[in-house]
Amino acid sequence: MTDQQRTPIIVFDVNETLLDITTLSPLFERVFGDGVVLREWFAQLILYSQTMTLSGRYAPFGELAIGTLHMVGTIHGIAIEQTDIEELKQRLSVMPAHTDVAPALNTLRKAGFRLVTLSNSPGGSSPSPLERAGLGDFFERSFSVDAIGKFKPAPETYQMVADELSMQTIDLVLVACHLWDTAGAQAVGCHGALLTRPHNAILPVAELPQPNFISADLGDLIQQLIKHWKKN
């Protein structure tokens, strides 16, 4: 059976790909006087999650998020209060879906694709952020890196999804708006579909796997997937 004949399982990243992290901006505007600090905090959070994995250590993503907020506060000479931490937790739990997400997921499901998620965020809470955002029913399973104690883009995170679904990695397509995520998935044999939301872009380095599919528009990106696997 050829690549185009197999119907893959679509694996969605969650934070920023599906859920809109810009709704955290008011916290950073209030604490730092500039909502743009959100991007600094998020970049540091991703950097240090990957540092933990490369160092052979692990702490839940939520703990890292809080620690990173304290670190960014120290950098800017601002003390982070407990009320700031509680607001961060609350806002993280109720991030809304991007407006383009539900229509795209519905189109994929109607085309016959199975959908799951893979997130650095811990799972198990109910209702989950995906459920609160009205997306829970689209996905047959939601995977968290908590299960193996390594953060994306560690190879084990994507392999875990394949193993749990009794699939090969070639039968998975990772949809994410972070190139480090799609590149990590491609490194273990998955297909990579990059959604270039604002603040995300291609890194033109020859040695880095470039996405199999790319678009700034989620509707267009999923149409590329449908066309490629001839699911009309």
Image (tube, rainbow, N blue to C red):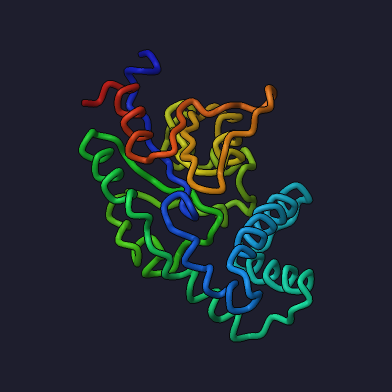
**102 on left or right of 17:** left
Which residue is at a point 38% across and 45% down the rendered structure image?
116
Indicate the position of residue 214 as horizontal and vertical percent values.
46, 31
Indicate the position of residue 26 as horizontal and vertical percent values.
52, 73
When asked about the image quadrant of residue 135, the answer is bottom left
When asked about the image quadrant of residue 84, the answer is bottom right
Q: Nearer the viewer, residue 232 or 128?
A: 232
- The total number of labels drawn is 0
Q: In which quarter of the image is the N terminus?
A: top left
Looking at this view, name the residue that lies furthest to the front.
33
**210 on left or right of 175:** right
Q: Which of 134 and 204 is in front in this view?
A: 204
Q: Quadrant of the C terminus?
A: top left
Which residue is at a point 49% across and 40% down the rendered structure image?
196
Looking at this view, name the residue that lies furthest to the top.
2
Indicate the position of residue 9 as horizontal and vertical percent values.
37, 35
**146 on left or right of 208:** left
Q: Please tell me whether residue 96 is drawn above or below residue 158 in the rendered image.
A: below
Q: Nearer the viewer, residue 114 or 104?
A: 104
Q: Please tell me whether residue 118 is drawn above or below residue 39 in the rendered image.
A: above
Which residue is at a point 45% across and 39% down the rendered structure image?
175
Indicate the position of residue 148 as horizontal and vertical percent values.
60, 51
Which residue is at a point 34% across and 34% down the rendered structure image?
220
